[in-house]
Image (tube, helix red, strand yellow):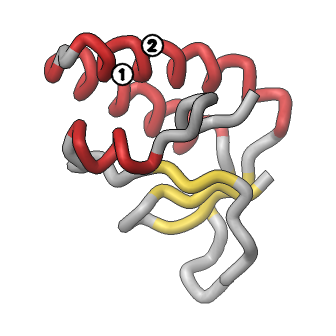
Amino acid sequence: MIVRIMGEGQVRLDDGRLTTLNKLDNELLTEMERGDESGFRRTLAALLDAVRASGTPLPDDSLEPSELILPSPDATLEEVREMLSDDGLIPG
């Protein structure tokens, strides 16, 4: 699966990592619903770090279709809220 982190680029990620990412995504959704800004920041950083750590960066000149698009590390709570579907940032 190809994942884009806005402002950073794309990484190739094994589908087997989705369980871990979904757990973080669910935490992020809960913190957003509560308006927990510090929890939101912490969990967003953990989610992006997990993608970076387990993914393989694609070359900058590569433009493959992204199956997931994640917000930049400095995205606001409101910006991320606009990106959400009923499943959060990560379907499933």
- The image shows residue 70 at horizontal and vertical percentages of 49, 49
- The image shows residue 82 at horizontal and vertical percentages of 37, 48
Task: Tell me the residue at 39%/12% (across/down).
Answer: 30
Q: Is residue 12 left or right of residue 39?
A: right
* 53 w.r.t. 24: above or below: below
Q: Is residue 74 left or right of residue 58?
A: left
Residue 21, picture quadrant: top right
Task: Tell me the residue at 44%/49% (across/down).
Answer: 83
* 41 w.r.t. 84: above or below: above
Labelled pair 2, 1 in contact (Cβ < 8 Å)? yes
The residue sitting at the bottom extreme is 61
- The image shows residue 47 at horizontal and vertical percentages of 47, 30
Q: Residues within 10 Å of mark 1 (few under 14, many from 20)?
A: some
Tell me the quadrant of the picture where the C terminus can be found.
Answer: top right
According to the image, label 2 marks what residue? 27
Label 2, label 1: how far apart the Cα atoms are: 7 Å
- The image shows residue 40 at horizontal and vertical percentages of 27, 23
Task: Tell me the residue at 36%/31% (across/down).
Answer: 44
Q: State the mark number for residue 28.
A: none
* 75 w.r.t. 87: above or below: below
Q: Is residue 81 left or right of residue 24?
A: left
**Which of pointers 2 and 1 lies earlier in the amino acid sequence?**
2
- Three-letter amino acid code at the position of disc 2: Glu
Q: Is mark 1 on a helix, strand or loop?
A: helix
- Three-letter amino acid code at the position of disc 1: Thr
Q: Is mark 2 on a helix, strand or loop?
A: helix
According to the image, label 1 marks what residue? 43
Residue 41, picture quadrant: top left
Numbered disc in front, either 2 or 1: 2
